[in-house]
Image (cartoon, rainbow, N blue to C red):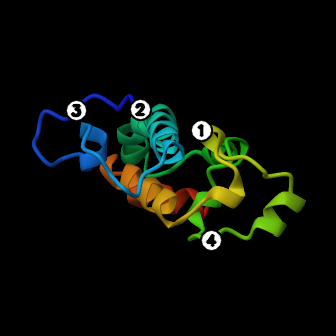
Amino acid sequence: MSVTSAAAIPFSEPPYLNGLPSPYYTPSHYRWQKACRSFISENLTASALEWEREGLVPPEIFSRFATANFLLPNLPAPLPIDWAKKLGLGTLAGGLKVEEFDYLHFLIYTDEVCVSLLALLVAAVGRV
């Protein structure tokens, strides 16, 4: 199983990302973590300081989250599967099917947001 690059600071990454075995994390959790980190780095971290100076998160960020199906993970698990499928939201980032989204996927998403130090920014996206 491939993992993301190990952190230079001890204990700054969850153990499963440093190659330690886990009875809880499945391949879908690893794919989901990579997809979350990539999306957050690309769409939020890159411009966060500029938005902080301006005091405004651009409205198109909401559209980016919606297009990439990253609004749904803001709901706690278990997701409202029937409702999501009626809206055409059958698959999340990393190829994760909505019916497979569990509490660990939610925790991974929350961890990646917090790691980016942008928890307040993501909360603001929900209010744009």
Query: Does 70 sit left or right of 16 as displayed?
Result: right
Q: Which residue is mark 4?
A: 78
Choose the circle earlier in sequence order: 1 or 4.
4
Numbered label attached to residue 94: 1
Q: Say what secondary structure mark 3 lies in.
A: loop
Choose the circle earlier in sequence order: 2 or 4.
2
Q: Which residue is mark 2?
A: 46
Q: Position of residue 15 (x, y in %)?
A: 24, 48
Q: Residue at x 41, y 32 (%)?
A: 46
Q: Say what secondary structure mark 2 lies in.
A: helix
Q: Position of residue 61 (x, y in %)?
A: 60, 44
Name the quadrant containing residue 85: bottom right
Query: Does 4 sit left or right of 98 as displayed?
Result: left
User: Looking at the image, can residue 103 be seen?
Assistant: yes
The amino acid pointed to by label 4 is Pro
- For disc 4, the neighbor class at 10 Å (few under 14, some 14 to 19, many from 20) is some
Q: Are marks 1 and 2 in contact (CB under 8 Å)?
A: no
From the viewer's perspective, is the residue at label 1 or at label 2 nearer?
A: 1
Q: Position of residue 84 (x, y in %)?
A: 79, 61
The amino acid pointed to by label 2 is Ala
Q: Residue 83, relative to residue 65: is it above or below?
A: below
From the viewer's perspective, is the residue at label 2 or at label 4 nearer?
A: 4
- For disc 1, the neighbor class at 10 Å (few under 14, some 14 to 19, many from 20) is some
The amino acid pointed to by label 1 is Gly
